[in-house]
Image (cartoon, grey):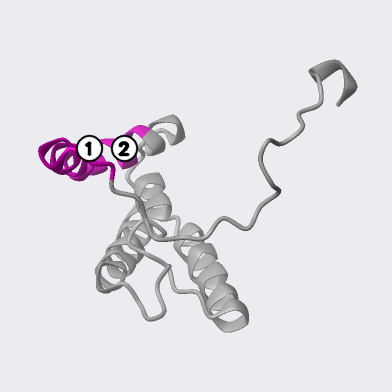
Amino acid sequence: MYRTEDPRATHLRRFSKQLGEQAGEPQWFQLSQRIESVVTGDKKLYPNVDFYSASAFYSMGIPIDLYTPIFAVSRISGWTAHVLEQYANNRLIRPRTEYIGPPYPQQVLPIDQR
């Protein structure tokens, strides 16, 4: 979560706008821009680089089913680096957080009772 704008999002926003205009479908960029405006204004949350990728991908004619695989492929080198770091140091690296959910063990209802 960004408290200020992700600098990469600035560039992808411009690129998404250009792609939408070139494809003759600027409404997808405009929709993304409106969503960003509402969320930034109401929640003070700023988009990361991935936010404008959907409108950019759509304008390029990339099938929607490929958005998630493209996202994952672009992250694999980083994920792999984290795993290699953890193996090299023989320890699992976890974010610093405090669990505030229900106490363990949690009761799970059988599926037929849900």
The residue carrying pointer 2 sits among few (fewer than 14), some (14 to 19) or many (20 or more) residues within 10 Å by Cα, namely few
Query: CA separation, marks 1 and 2?
Result: 6 Å
Q: Are marks 1 and 2 in contact (CB under 8 Å)?
A: yes
* Residue shown at 35% from the left, 37% from the top: 62
Residue 99 drawn above or below residue 61: below
Q: Position of residue 7 (x, y in %)?
A: 26, 74
What type is the residue that disc 1 sits on?
Ile
**Residue 14 vs residue 108: left or right?**
left
Work out whether residue 88 or residue 18 is closer to the camera in this orientation and state it: 88
What residue is rendered at 31% in x and 68% in y? 9
Q: Which mark is residue 72?
A: 2
User: Which residue sits at x=56%, y=68%?
Assistant: 35
Please provide the residue range marked out in magenta.
69-92
Assess whether residue 88 is covered by the magenta stretch: yes
Residue at image mark 1: 76
- Viewer-proximal residue, 38 or 2? 2
Q: Position of residue 114 (x, y in %)?
A: 86, 26
Magenta span: chief secondary structure: helix
In which image quadrant can residue 85 be found?
top left
Q: Residue at x 20, y 37 (%)?
A: 83
Please, what secondary structure does the residue beneath circle 1 have? helix
